Every structure is written in C-alpha cells, then in structure tokens.
Image (cartoon, rainbow, N blue to C red):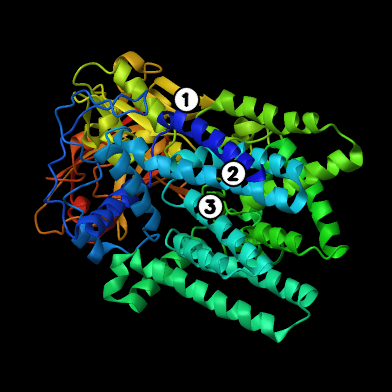
C-alpha cells in the first residue's frame, strides 16, 4: 500500500500541475536552453548536425488558454519555435560551454518531440514543461515513500504535502524545466539510491545512484556538492553499524567508484560540446560556476559572522509557509534528539542534505541572486524534517492528525490559489508579504523569472488594436514566445519612442531596481499611466503601458533654458544650468570634422557639483529612445531626461578627442 499511495500522491500533483501549465510564462533563460536541447536531440535521433531535413518553421498564433495544440491554422508543419536553423548542432559544438550542462535541455526537448512534434497533443511550449511537472511529481511520491519508511506514514504524508505546497517548488515545477527542478529531483533520487544501496547492500541501487548522479551532473554542477552529504553519512554508519570493518569499506568504495564512473560517463555522453576537448572545456564550465557563485555581489545588510552571507537563510525564513516553517523547527529539535541520543543514521543523512545546499550559498565569498531557486535541493529535506516535526507534535502534544493535515495544506493552498500563478513571489507574514518585502527593500523582491509574462500576453491579445506595436521596457524579445501573440501584433523593441509618444504598448516585469535600470523604464513609470498590471499583495510584478498622450499622467509643460553654460573637460563635457532644474532633454549639434567617433559615453548629474549620480545607459546606443536610432550620430545628439532635479550634467566621453566635444549649438529643456 505504501508504494501505491506514493504513486497516488505523485499522480495528484502531476494532474494539477499539468492542468495549470498554460497559466505560466516561460523561464527567461529558455532561449538559452531549449534551442540547444533541440540541436543536440536532433543529432542524437538522426545523426544530422543541422535542421535542413525539417520543414521550415512558420509563424502562427497558439491559443493561450489551453494545454492542447491549438494554432490559428493547422495547415503548418509541427516544427518547434526553438528549432532554429541559425543555432544548430555545429553552432553549439563551437559556442557552448558558457553555462549549465544540457542534459535536461535535451530531455525536455524529447518531451516536446513526442508530445508536440510527433503526436500533436500538447502545444509547442507546454510540451517542454511537462518534463518538469513529471519530475516534480516523482519527487513528491519519493518523499512520501522515503519519509514513511524512516519516520512513519503520517510523517510521510505531511512531508509530501509540505513539498507539494511549497510555493517556490510548486511554481518552478511549471516552467523551470531546464535547471533547478530537474537538479533537485535527480539530487534527491541520487541520495535515495545511495541510501537504499548501502543500507540494503544492493549493488543495483548503487549503479542506479550513478545514473542519477550523471543526470544531476548533466543538469547542474550542484550535483558535485552531494559528496558532502554522502561522505559524512557513510562515516557515521561505518563506525556505528559496521565497526570500521575493512570488508565493508572495500565493498562501498568498489561499487561507489563504479557509480561515479557511470555518472561521469553519462555526463560526457550527454554533452557533445565536451567531446572535442574534454579537459579544457570542462575547465571552462568550472570557471562559469565560479563566476556566478562568487562574483554576483551581495547586500552588506546580510553580511554575517566571519563574512558569511545570511541572505539565503533570510529568504528561506521569509518564503516558507508559516505552518511548514513551525513544523520544520520542531522537526529540527526531534532530529537532533534522534542523532545525539539514538545515533540515528537516517537523521544524519537528512540533516546533511538540508545543510549542504544552504552552506554552499552562505559560505564566505559565496553569493546567490533571485532568491534561493539555485539551491532548491534543500526543499525536500526541509519537507522531510517538517514531516518528522508533525509526527512529534501529534505524539507528544496530542494534536489531532486531521488538524495537523488541515493546517499544513489548507491555509497555504488557499493563499497559493489567491496569488496563482505567481506563487514564486510569495512571502509569508513574517516580512509582511510581498508588500513588506518591497517596503524592507529585500533584494530581488518581485522577481518571477518570466512566469507573469503569459498573463501579459493574454491581455495584449485581447486589447491591442490590429497591427498594434508592442515593445519591452528593457527585456529581450524571446521572453514571450512569439506564437503566444497574435500574428498581426508587431513586437519589436525598435518601437520604443519615449517622450515622442508614438503609441506603442510596452510590457515589463517589475521587481527591485527595475524602475531605475533605463531611461525608458523611468519615463514610463513617471509620465504614463499603466493600462494593465499584475499585482500580488498590492505590489505590481508586471505592467503594460500605452505610450500616448491619452495616458499621460499629468500635463508637463516644457520650457527652453537659455542660461546654460558649458565647458570642455578632459573627461568630456560639463553643462551648468545655473540653478537646480527639473530636466526634460538636451538637443546638441556637434562638428564631425577632424575628430574621432564616440566609443563609450555615459551621463552623470549633480545638484552641487560634488555628489554625482550616474544615469543608466551607455553611449553610443539605441536604448534611450530606440525609435530615434543610434545616439549620437551624424552630428546630432539628443539626451532625454525624466524630470531629474539637478544643476550640473556631465557627459563622460571616450576617446578624449571625440567629435561630441566639438559643440556647435545646444538647447536645454526643463519642466516648469
């Protein structure tokens, strides 16, 4: 029965996960993963190094309210959006290696190949994501089965419920199908197979552990840290159960070594890029992980003892459902008693499982970004310990089983339903929800990694006029798969018009720092009323504007400032308004004769000439107002502002003899 219930619990998660798939956008990293997965998969299936044997992809509009394949025309070949002839097997054999391994990219592409390309059952995008939901469902069943075997059926049921309703796990299982969800599942299966193989002394389970190690390593290098979970546990049971017997050590080392070799072999077979230069190219991948794990920067507010980074621990406390967090705290107490009083080896394994992923991100010099999705391996361990805590409360405090099950599942399920499908921006009451996290300026509040885009896409389809223009504030075009938008909608970032107000719709995800990242962000936020918002706890996580005069917040009157002085500095140009003004724009003409073209430039402003603030954007670029094209160009330059209060404006320019220093005339406009 215990095996059947594990399957049932995993099945329930799978059904609800699949039903809700069409509610989520794609992970904004999808464009870096899915084309690669398709290229490698096509090579493995056909031996071909390009997509020349496939029909050409034809654009269509896929209905967004269904899991089924439902295009606006069935008279097209079922070729995936991500099977791009420009990035094929040959491309990745040269350009891959600057990111995570591709095994889960390939496996999710296999789901797409079967469910979309061959069967035509599931739409192109969601077919990839069923891979993630399936894996997450396997983990739910595994956690119930394993926890029941160690701590009893009630603990197992609570552990499975705590995992299923963990906001980050639930949300990411729908669209984080190339990295963190697969890694968490394969990591967990690896530990289970090692546990099963060693405890029951069965070689087949250790070989299975090698396969899971290869799958985990082929997804993310986080798998390498599993050694710090397994070795302490082996040392513990070696001394406790086997009395340091040499024969047992030889058996574990022999079959453990074979398992590692199986895993490494699977890792290399699954990544063709490594075949040409295994040692050198693996070294490149290690450099990538070193850079993202130690140089992403951290907030000094979370600098702990001995230089530790307390941000991950804070995030876990603030984003874990309160009842799960409380039961986890009780479970830690019960776990400690089992370890130190009963010398329970299983509890040692679960404790190491919990601590190692967190320690990896809190270690001095280590960093993480966007919350804790990069160390999600801790979540199953936390769920198991919460299950143990629930069993302890039931037995010691005599709380009803039904009451505990109700408290673990119902309140958080209602909360997730309320904020669905934006569960990965959940914060609990300890920080005041998402609004409290924003108020306290918690780093990365509101970051949803692309999940909210689908809601924005549906609004655009229903409200944008025929042949309407759509842009992103700042993001890249692939963040919303083009097949999610009507064919007539013109999606090009070159339509960003800023103060010219040419009527484009602009969409963006909103999170900490997004308002200040570009002129266009600041302009829309200050001057234009949004036409659509996705909110959680009263905080916007996605906005859409229509940039026209009908949606102007207030009538800003521009005036020409005729009393502006300037001087040429070694570093560039400095303008002095004479007094503090609310800036609108600068229009400048310069002489291009006998000088060098601008290579790099940026703008700084100051009220007093001593304290300077650098504005976003680097010249020459087309990010300020894309509709104007590159700036500066052809002896003309326009710098738009968004009402910043300042007196001095510096243009820092390279090279030193750049043409922009040859000022012919200029006009400064300000808001009265």
Is residue 263 or residue 2 the one in the foreground? 2
Residue that mark 1 sits on: 534
Side of 359 where 80 appears, left or right: left
Which residue shows up at 61% across the image and 59% down it? Answer: 192
Q: Could you say where residue 651 lies in the image, as x and y percent from the top left?
A: 32, 50
Reading the chain from its start, which is encountered first: label 2 or label 3? 2
**24 over 179 or under it: above or below:** above
Distance in Å between CA atoms under marks 2 and 3:
9 Å
Total marks placed: 3
**56 over 376 or under it: above or below:** above
Q: Residues within 10 Å of mark 1 (few under 14, many from 20)?
A: some
Residue that mark 3 sits on: 185
When asked about the image quadrant of residue 8, the answer is top right
Furthest-bottom residue in view? 246
**662 over 418 or under it: above or below:** below
Is residue 226 or residue 42 the one in the foreground? 42
Is residue 437 or residue 206 the one in the foreground? 206
């Amino acid at each position: 029965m215990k095996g059947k219930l594990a399957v049932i619990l995993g099945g329930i998660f799978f059904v609800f996960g699949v039903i809700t798939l069409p509610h989520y956008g794609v992970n904004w990293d999808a464009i870096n993963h899915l084309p690669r997965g398709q290229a490698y998969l096509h090579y493995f299936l056909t031996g071909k190094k390009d997509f020349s044997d496939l029909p050409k992809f034809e654009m269509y509009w896929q209905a967004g309210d269904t899991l089924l394949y439902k295009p606006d025309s069935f008279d097209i070949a079922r070729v995936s959006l991500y099977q791009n002839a420009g990035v094929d097997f040959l491309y990745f054999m040269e350009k891959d290696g600057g990111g995570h391994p591709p095994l889960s990219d390939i496996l999710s592409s296999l789901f797409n190949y079967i469910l979309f390309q061959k069967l035509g059952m599931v739409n192109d995008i969601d077919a990839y994501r069923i891979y993630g939901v399936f894996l997450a469902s396997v983990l739910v069943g595994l956690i119930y089965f394993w926890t029941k075997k160690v701590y009893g059926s009630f603990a197992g049921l609570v552990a499975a419920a705590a995992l299923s309703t963990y906001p980050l796990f639930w949300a990411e299982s729908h669209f984080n199908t190339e990295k963190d969800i697969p890694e968490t599942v394969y990591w967990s299966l690896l530990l289970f197979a090692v546990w099963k193989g060693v405890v029951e002394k069965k070689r087949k389970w250790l070989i299975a552990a090698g396969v899971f190690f290869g799958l985990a390593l082929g997804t993310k290098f986080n798998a390498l840290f599993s050694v710090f979970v397994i070795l302490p546990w082996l040392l513990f049971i070696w001394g406790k159960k086997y009395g340091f017997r040499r024969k047992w050590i030889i058996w574990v080392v022999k079959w453990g070594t074979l398992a590692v070799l199986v895993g490494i072999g699977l890792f290399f077979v699954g990544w063709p890029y490594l075949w040409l230069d295994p040692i050198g190219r693996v070294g490149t991948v290690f450099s990538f992980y070193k850079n993202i794990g130690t140089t992403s920067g951290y907030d000094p507010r979370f600098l702990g003892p001995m230089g530790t980074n307390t941000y991950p621990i804070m995030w876990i406390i603030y984003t874990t459902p309160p009842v799960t967090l409380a039961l986890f705290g009780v479970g830690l107490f019960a776990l400690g008693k089992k370890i130190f009083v009963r010398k329970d080896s299983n509890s040692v394994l679960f404790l190491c499982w919990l601590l190692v992923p967190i320690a990896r991100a809190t270690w001095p010099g280590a960093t993480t970004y966007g919350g804790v999705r990069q160390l999600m391996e801790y979540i199953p361990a936390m769920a198991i310990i919460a299950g143990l805590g629930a069993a302890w409360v039931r037995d010691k405090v005599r709380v009803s089983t039904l009451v505990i099950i109700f408290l673990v599942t119902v309140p958080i399920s209602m909360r997730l339903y309320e904020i669905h499908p934006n569960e990965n921006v959940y914060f609990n009451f300890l920080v005041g929800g998402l609004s409290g996290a924003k108020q306290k300026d918690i780093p990365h509040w509101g970051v949803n990694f692309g999940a909210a885009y689908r809601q924005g896409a549906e609004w655009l389809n229903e409200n944008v006029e025929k042949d309407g223009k759509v842009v992103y504030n700042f993001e890249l075009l692939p963040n919303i798969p083009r097949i999610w938008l009507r064919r007539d909608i013109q999606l090009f970032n070159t339509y960003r018009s800023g103060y010219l107000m040419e009527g484009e719709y602009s969409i963006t995800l909103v999170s900490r720092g997004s308002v200040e990242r570009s002129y266009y962000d600041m302009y829309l936020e200050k001057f234009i009323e949004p036409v659509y918002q996705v909110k959680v706890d009263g905080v916007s996580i996605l906005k859409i504007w229509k940039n026209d005069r009908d949606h102007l917040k207030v009538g800003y009157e521009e005036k020409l400032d005729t009393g502006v002085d300037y001087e040429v500095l070694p570093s560039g140009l400095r303008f002095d308004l004479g007094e503090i003004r609310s800036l609108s724009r600068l229009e400048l003409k310069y002489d291009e004769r006998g000088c060098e073209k601008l290579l790099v430039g940026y703008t700084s402003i100051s009220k007093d000439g001593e304290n300077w603030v650098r504005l976003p954007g680097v010249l020459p670029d087309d990010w300020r107002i894309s509709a104007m094209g590159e700036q500066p160009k052809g002896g003309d330059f326009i710098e738009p502002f968004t009402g910043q209060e300042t007196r001095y404006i510096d243009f820092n320019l390279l090279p030193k003899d750049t043409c922009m220093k040859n000022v012919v005339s200029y006009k400064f406009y300000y808001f009265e």
